Amino acid sequence: MKKGNLTAAAVAASFVMIASGGAIAGPTGSNAAEAEKLLSAATDWFNGNGNYGTNKVTYDGPVITLRTSSHLPPVAGISKLQRKGFDRLEEMSGGKIKVKDTWSKTVHGVKEGRKATRTGLSDYAPCFSLYTAKDYNLVHGLGLPFLFNNSHEAIATAEHLYGKYLKKEHERFKVKIARVAHTSPYHLWTNKAVRSLEDVKGMKIRAGGGIHSEIIAAIGGTQVSMPGADSYTAMQRGTLDGIHF
């Protein structure tokens, strides 16, 4: 896809705040019926039901190929959801957008999504702000503990603040944001029982950069940089004493 064809996603770094995580996971609804009602618009769109996404396509040029890439395998839950979303995008465009998706680190690793979009290897890729923590400043404020009731509030806040406060911080790397995501709270998994802060002292704990490494240091642990996918085997081998994920 030529960069001028679809500006919003042409050099897009999606998931930019997915790892900034300080949100408290709140319920989608207080009961199953309420949750189903709140999520109905999203599920109907994913399943191609109703009139969600109905629009008149006036573009009459050649088909635009949107190249997407991810470090995740196609069988991952979030990958399956993304592929469904790509299918809806193709339908909504009347066949004028074709998504060519690649997975499993074929194009780049977990930390290189931003570089892949900037250099033209991909049009749409994940970018995790914690893995390049020194490159960002204001965005890390969204990861402060106890700031939001749930991830949905965090995303809405990020989108509201983006144009005025966060846009320059990201676009100086020659990428544009296609969407923002935010995790639920991280957990601390350890190979021994932790009943006090004294028990944490000296433990080697896998964590992301930025505020996450500061949190691990504040409780007395030693932060170890490592991809999440490698951390479980590292814990089995004894290289790590804990995982913050």
Image (cartoon, rainbow, N blue to C red):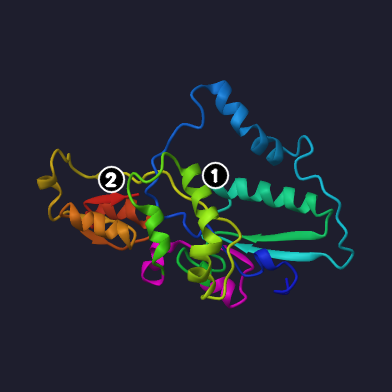
At x 17%, y 54%, the residue is 203
Name which residue type carries label 2.
Answer: Leu
Q: Is residue 124 magenta?
A: yes
Residues rendered magenta in the picture = 115-135
Instruction: Classify residue 222 as left or right of residue 57.
Output: left
- Percent position of residue 64, x then y: 78, 66
Residue 128 image-quadrant placement: bottom left
Residue 235 in magenta? Answer: no
Dot label at residue 77: 1
Q: Residue at x 64, y 68 (%)?
A: 123
Q: Is residue 41 above or below residue 140?
A: above
Furthest residue toward front: 164
* In-front residue for pair 151/230: 151
**Tally of marks:** 2
Residue 181 location (% of width, % of height): 51, 52
The answer to whether residue 126 is seen in the rendering is no
User: Where is mark 2, residue-wise?
Assistant: 188
Residue pictured at 76% horizontal, 45% vertical: 53
Q: Quick one: label 2, few (<14), some, or many (20+) residues within 10 Å?
A: few
Where disc 2 sits, the SS reads strand
Rendering coords of residue 120 (x, y %): 62, 76
Q: Amino acid at mark 1?
A: Gly
Circle 1 Cα neighbour tier, 10 Å, few/some/many (<14 / 14–19 / ≥20):
few
